[in-house]
Amino acid sequence: MKLTRRSFIQTISAVPVFSLPSWAAGREIAADAVIIGGGAGGCAAALAACRAGLRVVMTEETPWIGGQFTSQAVPPDEHPWIEMFGCTASYRAFRNGVRQYYRSHYPLLPPHAGNPRLNPGGGSVSVLTHEPRVALAVLHAMLQRYLSSGRLALFTRAAPRRADVDGDAVKAVEFRDDAGLPRVVRAPFFLDATETGELLPLTRTEYVTGAESRAQTGELHAPERAQPDNHQAFTVCFALGYDPEGDHTIDRPEQYSFWREYVPQLRPAWPGKLLSWSMSEPISLKPRRVFLDPTLQAKLPGLNLWLYRRVIQKAIYEPGFCSTDVTLVNWPQNDYWLGNLYEVPPEQAARHLRRARQLSLSLLYWMQTEAPRPDGGTGWKGLHLRPDITGTADGLAMYPYIRESRRIQAEFTVLEHHVGTDARMKVTGKLREEVAAEVFPDSVGVGSYRIDLHPSSGGDNYIDVSSLPFQIPLGALIPKRMENLLPACKNLGVTHITNGCYRLHPVEWNIGESAGALAAFCVQRRLRPRQVRQDGSLLKEFQNLLVRQGVEIAWPRLRPR
């Protein structure tokens, strides 16, 4: 039987059903480590902790594990050396698994099936743009051995509700499972891998939000005064197909009039309306023209947004497999910065999420009805949402793409002058060709990305500056007071500025994997994380363990980005 697009989707559309191990079947659960949040960092933490022999509970608020890769519908943002070095072995296994999944299950044409660097979507943002459901399938495959062996208990549609804390230690966390039943899990270690650092306020762990002041951090791009409510924009992403013969125009969104006329009030100024093909160029902040052409016929200079985050390219498959390319819309035009999703009353957060969803739907309606086309016409009425890609009824992503989280007050905080190119030049007095990021003796990983801050709820336009290939210091994973809580994603010891380069897929994965390995190291040796950092022999032992497991903790000499 020939594999069609529909039959393939049916094989991976259902959310997997898990059989809980006997030790995790009751209302009271005792584990070795608990990971709250099943995004990229949470999955990597679970792999590391289970690999070390721990019994692990992982919860995830949405039906899908994977976070940025899946429920947020964001194809990987990666550095230019990712095919050669600069990530952990398990992250590389994930990337290889994505490519192999396409080779095994999709009718690729021979030139593409044999391409060792297959880019399924052919998107320009990354050398590996792919569908969220494929990432979901690969992540489940990577975790399945631990699910089958009973080492991992996974609860989806489960969010933390409260925590039991005794002094400097977390004793238990309560959550509700997908049936709405309360469960309490106890363990020696708890890892916060939630998108917004939800465990930090629940456990009374000291944390920071928004922008620190220049007086606090000495950072080149920090504001003069602290702005704790100034968070990067979040985005409700969505998937789009294109039918050149059809009219798929959606009903006019309720808030379309507002968003159609909205002119961002940012510092420095945004060039005109948000719903337009003119935006601020992130680095220079000068006006930048982009365009949309799902037909790929226009011969114009500049960025065709259709190609930017494309995840399905029809041309690489056998004829008849799929009818259209598909792109994921995570563009400046649907970034939402008029309010925050955390550190605000629940009803206010819900209002901002509704408005962000309306912005995304308004962008779609504008593209269908009014957007200028390269051929001089207006509107692409054949654009249509793809709910099968996002796993939702409306075609919008299950969860907003969160760029900035609560961040622990850590034993060590990464500052701009540790990793920013201009700031490092100023501190070291070295030329651009000679400068390198700070070398951290307690490194537990590496990453690389520009310091890329999107417009913020405090009214700032982009802050997008060069950074240097950096390390992840162990001190940034250790809260200044709490003894058994570890950050496992974007909530480590960074600032509003340095969060801009520590927030992307491979870095979050490395943070989670190193945190999971640290929890296991401490459980098995009855240690506290800060003891590992303070004792030179323990630190070396832990770093050697990471290296043996495929975690790179140092970079070769590279040029600044």
Image: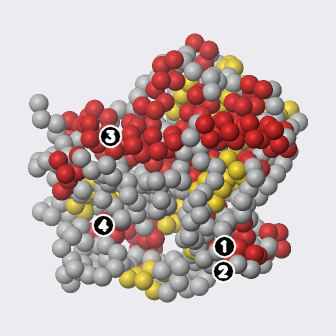
The residue located at (76%, 58%) in the rendering is 413
Local secondary structure at mark 1: loop
Disc 4 to disc 2, C-alpha distance: 39 Å
Kindly identify which residue carries mark 4: 306
Judge left or right: residue 312 versus residue 154: left
Disc 2 to disc 3, C-alpha distance: 43 Å
Disc 2 to disc 1, C-alpha distance: 6 Å
Please tell me in which quadrant of the rendered image residue 273 appears.
bottom left
* Mark closer to the observer (2, 3): 2
Q: Position of residue 313 (x, y in %)?
A: 24, 56
Q: Amino acid at mark 1?
A: Val
Local secondary structure at mark 4: helix
Kindly identify which residue carries mark 3: 100
Q: Is residue 140 above or below residue 466?
A: above
The residue located at (22%, 61%) in the rendering is 242
Judge left or right: residue 386 versus residue 161: left
**Quadrant where the N terminus is found in the figure:** top left
Disc 4 to disc 3, C-alpha distance: 25 Å
The one nearer the camera, 463 or 443, is 443
